[in-house]
Image: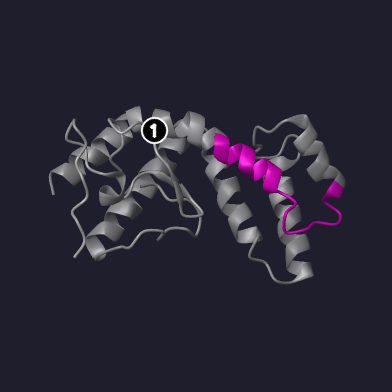
Amino acid sequence: MRQPLPRFTDGCRHPQELGVCLVIRRLPVRAPARTVSVVVSLGKTLHPLPTGGGQRARRRQSGQIAFREFLKSEYSEENILFWLDCEEYKKIKTVPEMISSANRIYSEFVQTEAPRQINIDCTTRESITNNISKPTLTSFDTAQKHIYSLLARDCYPRFLKSDIYQGLLRRNDSR
């Protein structure tokens, strides 16, 4: 039988209980224990933890939606959209589909003056630009790692302090 998840000294539940910590490839990046209580999973790693029923899955989904809404309110939704598109891109099996998808990602997120231009260094942008005519499944890896780092270090800690997150905590605590 599984042990119940521990409570932190300030009464917050373990992040996995509510489903909100930044998760990528099944490795959680957690904020300080005193503030963590909800899991925003990125990409198709939406179920990295055992769900244990529909209620936990609904909580995880509400955490994901809340994080995306927060990013939208901060005018940085392009970061999570780019990250998600890169995860889908890595699953492509055919060369024509890879070329088409790489060009779409490039024109939407990477190209200078793109509609949802992401904030990456000029070296990374130039490297992608120079290689876009012959894309590989790793074409966007450096940019994706940079964006993930930005989400983990900057956006996610602000999300934990946001009214959106606090409202999510209150809703989950009232259940």
Would residue 116 be visible to someone looking at this image?
Answer: no
Residue found at x 30% / y 60%:
57
Q: Please tell me in which quadrant of the rendered image residue 136 appears.
A: bottom right
With 98 as the anchor, is 60 left or right in this view?
A: left
Tell me which corner region of the image, top left, top right, bottom left or bottom right, holds residue 37.
top left
At 47% from the left and 58% from the top, the residue drawn is 45
Give the camera-side residue of 3 and 27.
3
Q: Quadrant of the N terminus?
A: bottom left
- Mark yes or no: residue 99 visible: yes
Helix, strand, or loop for circle 1?
A: helix
Quarter of the rendering containing residue 8: top left
Measuring 86% from the left and 54% from the top, which residue is drawn there? Answer: 133
Q: What residue would you read off at disc 1?
A: 159
Q: Any magenta on residue 132? A: yes
Amino acid type, callout 1: Phe
Q: Position of residue 175 (x, y in %)?
A: 13, 49
Which range is magenta? 131-149
The vertical placement of 63 against 76, above or below, is below
